[in-house]
Amino acid sequence: MTDYTAWQRLCTLIDDDPEIWPSVQQALEGDSRDEDEEQGEDQSGDDRDESGVEEDDGADEAWGALIDALDDCGALAYLHAEDTGMELADALAGVPRIVRLGLDTDEVGDVDGDVPTAAAAADALLAPVGLALVFLEEDSDAHPLVVVPRESVTEIVDTAAALGFVARQLP
């Protein structure tokens, strides 16, 4: 599977919103067009910036575009390290998959502790309906979380890893 195909598959596995893949695709394609227009090739044929450092393949921009697109369509529960179960419950209550099922996230809000502790309660709420909570690593203080079909978790984790990023099931 090519990286392009892997990115498209990852988008499809995480959420069914039709705007996610075009956003990621644009980030992938936009980066290569910008490099072609703004960068010359060195004598070895590698793309380099003015300092001579090789440019990346747009993967970081695509990962950021994926997280932004998930946030834009409401599929992302975006938390910070200091957040609690209440913030997780509030964020999950607006996620389309939760809304469609009519799940009550109040019990997650009653959990004392940090995001991982509350995520364990959320996962227990999601498991009976075939869903799971997946963390998409962004930075040390951020906790971007998505609700995905439980049967897709392994493929999401593996595909993200193949692309150079971390996705893992919480807890």
Image (cartoon, rainbow, N blue to C red):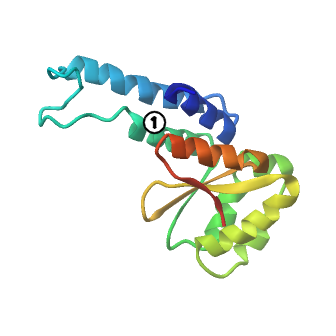
Question: In the image, what residue occupies the spot 67% across and 72% down?
Answer: 118
Q: Amino acid at mark 1?
A: Ala
Seen in the picture, residue 68 relative to 171 is either above or below; the reply is: above
Q: Would residue 87 appear left or right of 4 to someone viewing this image?
A: right
Question: How far from the left and from the top, in percent, is residue 100?
Answer: 82, 46
**Residue labelled with disc 1:** 62
Question: In the image, what residue occupies the spot 62% across and 40% down?
Answer: 73
Seen in the picture, residue 130 relative to 84 is either above or below; the reply is: above
Seen in the picture, residue 75 relative to 28 is either above or below; the reply is: below
Quadrant containing the C terminus is: bottom right
Question: In the image, what residue occupies the spot 65% across and 63% down?
Answer: 170
Q: Would residue 141 appear left or right of 11 to someone viewing this image?
A: left
Question: How far from the left and from the top, in percent, is residue 163?
Answer: 49, 40
Can residue 91 be seen by looking at this rendering? yes
- Count of marks placed on residues: 1
Question: How far from the left and from the top, in percent, is residue 162?
Answer: 52, 41
Query: Residue 83: which quarter of the image?
Result: bottom right
Badge 1: how crowded within 10 Å, few (<14), some, or many (20+)?
A: many
Question: How far from the left and from the top, in percent, is residue 56?
Answer: 32, 35
Query: Residue 132: which quarter of the image?
Result: bottom right
Question: In the image, what residue occupies the spot 67% across and 63% down?
Answer: 90
Can residue 74 be seen by looking at this rendering? no
